[in-house]
Image (tube, helix red, strand yellow):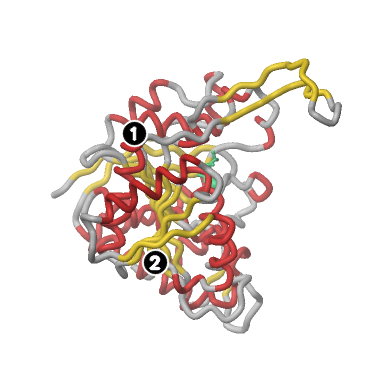
Amino acid sequence: MNEYKIAVIKGDGIGPEIVDSALRVLDRVQDKFGFRVNYEVFPAGGCAIDKYGMPLPDETLEGCRASDAVLLGAVGGPKWDSIEPSLRPERALLGLRSGLGLYANLRPAIMFEELKDASPVKNIDKMDIMMVRELTGGIYFGDSDSYSCNDILPDGTPKVRIAYDTESYSEGEIRRITDLAFRIARGRSRHLTLVDKANVLTSSRLWREIAEDVHDDYRDVSLDFLYVDNCSMQLISRPGDFDTIVTSNMFGDILSDEAGQITGSVGMLPSASLGKTGTPGMYEPIHGSAPDIAGTGKANPLATILSVAMMLRWQFGENEAADAVEEAVRKALAGGYRTSDISRGNAGEIPVDTNGMTDAVIAGL
Ligand code: IPM
Ligand code: MG
């Protein structure tokens, strides 16, 4: 029997609730498909700050490195908003991404037929986008600083203080992520869109140059380019026309929230963060810790459950089990089960809380 070891990080806010749901589904699916997943829980985020004075204890990073994969809920919350930036809960996430070398973030934005009504966009036919976001470079990890300054702006306004963050990409970073994106597009509808701001940014022009070069190895995949502002508009007006999108860390962060909301709720979107083949990937919902609804039972567990499906597929190659989880989610939606974020009060809807939705998915397995 195949055995896997995963590190589980529940985090803050709704994190523990949605991770517990996902683990219940994982327990059921491993029994059914005959493999074994052992897990160990590690602290990270705000709860780790409270307990250990730091968002990402060494023991957590080491535990993740020693696992086959990481399942993460969400980190952060208003409680930790005013602490020193280098100790914020979000640092845990960034530390895990860089510490595990997770340079590729896959964020599939799929519109379930049953949720068309929940989309803020009218008349969507279909939407099935794979967003490939670069995750360990760009402005998130570039040079940054802030300092006092006595200079004066041309109109006489004093500058007082300066703060900057730098968007910088190496050819190697762009090459490995665009190569992966082409491979992914090849397994889909063979169309890749590079989203950038090449009319303004030097780094974006390097992205275009490298993407065109990598394209030589993937002539069966078509490649086009879109400026990020235009892309955010096209996503709303013709979401069904996109296949695979590859983009930088910052643009991917923004566009994936937008794409997520078009599918009905950001509470539906899973993600996989991958590094070198054979190293542990991290699987998590794209949404945050939603502290306003923590403990109320309102959290939608589907993004985390679908993240487990991505783990089964991308990390373990347990494709049948992954299909079964995705199918069970579809069945729960078709059965009318709705957490409040995806409810439109339509006839036939069965309002459920986090546990109720989890039960519905498990029943579908
Ligand atoms: C995400 C989140 C993170 C990011 C934050 C919490 C640091 O928004 O995973 O999209 O910006 O990458
Ligand atoms: Mg984000």
Q: Which kind of residue does numbered mark 1 sit on? A: Gly
Label 2: state its secondary structure: loop
| Residue 243, disc | 2
Badge 2 vs badge 1, beta-carbon distance below 8 Å:
no
Please name the residue that numbered disc 1 is placed on.
101
Q: Give the x, y percent position of residue 268.
A: 50, 61
149 over 99 or under it: above or below: above
Q: Give the x, y percent position of residue 227.
A: 52, 56
Q: Give the x, y percent position of residue 296.
A: 64, 52
Q: Image point 40% across, 50% down: which residue?
A: 208
Q: Image point 59% across, 37% down: which residue?
A: 76
Direction from residue 244 to residue 196 in the image, left or right = right
Upstream in sequence: badge 2 or badge 1 = 1
251 over 303 or under it: above or below: above
Q: Which kind of residue does numbered mark 2 sit on? A: Asp
Residue nearest the observer in this picture, 267 or 196: 196
